[in-house]
Amino acid sequence: MTRPIYAIGDIHGQLNELTRVLALIEADGGENAEIVFMGDYTDRGPASAQVLDVLIDGVAQGKPWHCLKGNHDRMFSWFLQEYPRHDAYLPVYLYWLHERLGGDKTLASYDIAFTETDRALNVHARARNAVPQSHVEFLNGLALSFETPDLFFAHAGIRPGVPLGQQDEEDLLWIRKEFHIDQRDHGKLVVHGHTPVERATHYGNRVNIDVGAGYGKPLCAVVFEGRTCWTLEDEGRVPLLPKP
């Protein structure tokens, strides 16, 4: 019998939603259920620091949790470097602290408030002093992917046609259109987030479980047994079938 494995979509600082779906998973699979977290733990929502605390504590307890890196997690970790680093995938007018990306909400969860007139270096110095080293190490140590015999998990997806073991970090964190439009089987069912959809969607060769928690919508949890999958709802498992 295949052991179930659970996945949680992009959290984006939504602590209450994280607590809710962890309870659904525990009810379905017990307190030691194996879970893959799909990245984007930070930004936009109100409790990024507290979400990281939950994940760090679970890993420290030895829970079988696999925490993947999202592009927002990398933006946060790059901001915390000695010299803040801008992600080249962003338009030049966007920066991590911009309200559209939500870095301002992440710093607020560490009790760092600032205005547009604050000097950027001052905000950076305050952030480096306020963010615990355990959070920095966690962000820097996040995995880019996780796989089972049937499944390949990555935050954004994969570059079609490239072997799963040779995927580039930029694609695993940022890819959208080239991956979304490709209908080939990738050897394993690819599970991803990054691009919000109205509900968890099975496309046959991939499953998108980012349902917009970063914009205040409910978080999604999915359970897999081999390539068969279900969303977890209050009433239990609901089959997640490929789109016709």
Image (cartoon, rainbow, N blue to C red):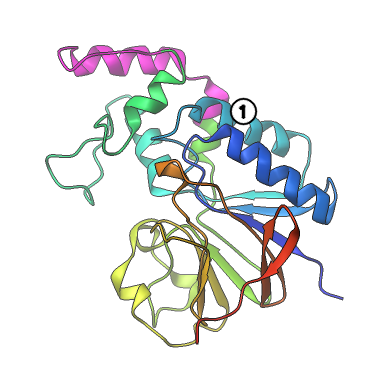
> Magenta stretch mostly in which secondary structure?
helix
Q: Which residues are magenta?
A: 112-136
Q: Where's residue 208, x and y in %?
A: 49, 65
Q: Is residue 237 above or below residue 27?
A: below
Instruction: Kindly identify which residue carries mark 1.
Output: 53
Pick the quarter of the image with the N terminus: bottom right
| Picture residue at 12% right of the left edge, 39% below the top | 93
Near-viewer residue (81 or 235)? 235
In the drawing, does residue 197 fall left or right of residue 49? left
SS under mark 1: helix
Tell which of 103 and 217 is nearer to you: 217
Name which quarter of the figure residue 120 lies in.
top left
Q: Position of residue 155 (x, y in %)?
A: 47, 57
Q: Residue at x 83, y 48 (%)?
A: 32
The one nearer the camera, 101 or 243, is 243
Horizontal placement of 143 versus 7: left or right? left
Residue 26 x, y percent position in the rendering: 80, 48
Which residue is drawn at the image coordinates 42% and 70% (left, top)?
Answer: 158
Q: Local crowd at mark 1 within 10 Å, few (<14), some, or many (≥20)? A: some
Return the residue nearer the eye: 236 or 103: 236
Q: Residue lying farthest left?
A: 93
In magenta stretch: residue 132: yes
